[in-house]
Amino acid sequence: MADIGTLTTLMGDAGLKAIGAGLAIAGTGLASGWAEKDIGSAAIGAMAENEALFGKGLILTVIPETIVIFGLVVALLIK
């Protein structure tokens, strides 16, 4: 297994920063999709029983998407 000094020599600082930014976006994107899947299915089930819950279901479905915005901010701060 290579240590960080070897990786920095092989890839350079820019390459490691790009990998870190990609991991920040990918991790938050996957987590947001996973959370939104569960919330969305529960919201659709609730709206099937009571149509008045549409607004609450929509708001709760949008909340996990803010996690990706945080990942984007971290990625921009890394670069």
Image: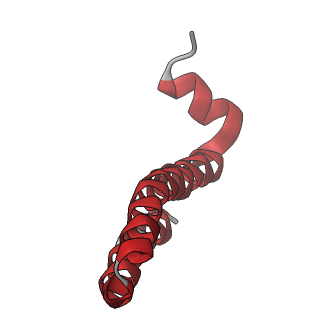
Residue 58 percent location from the top left of the image: 40, 83
Q: Quadrant of residue 43?
A: bottom left
Front residue of 35/72: it is 35
Q: How is the image coloured?
A: secondary structure
Residue closest to the far top: 1
Front residue of 49/34: it is 49
* Label total for image: 0
Residue closest to the far front: 49
Front residue of 43/61: it is 43
Q: Is residue 11 above or below residue 44?
A: above
Residue 70 visible in the displayed image: no
Residue 55 visible in the displayed image: yes
Q: Residue at x 32, y 90 (%)?
A: 52
Residue 1 percent location from the top left of the image: 57, 9
Q: Residue at x 32, y 84 (%)?
A: 53
Q: Quadrant of residue 67?
A: bottom left
Q: Residue at x 54, y 48 (%)?
A: 23
Q: Quadrant of residue 7?
A: top right
Residue 5 percent location from the top left of the image: 51, 26
Front residue of 60/71: it is 60
Residue 17 percent location from the top left of the image: 55, 52
Q: Left or right: 16 with respect to 43?
A: right
Q: Left or right: 71 with respect to 17?
A: left
Q: Is residue 67 above or below residue 54?
A: above
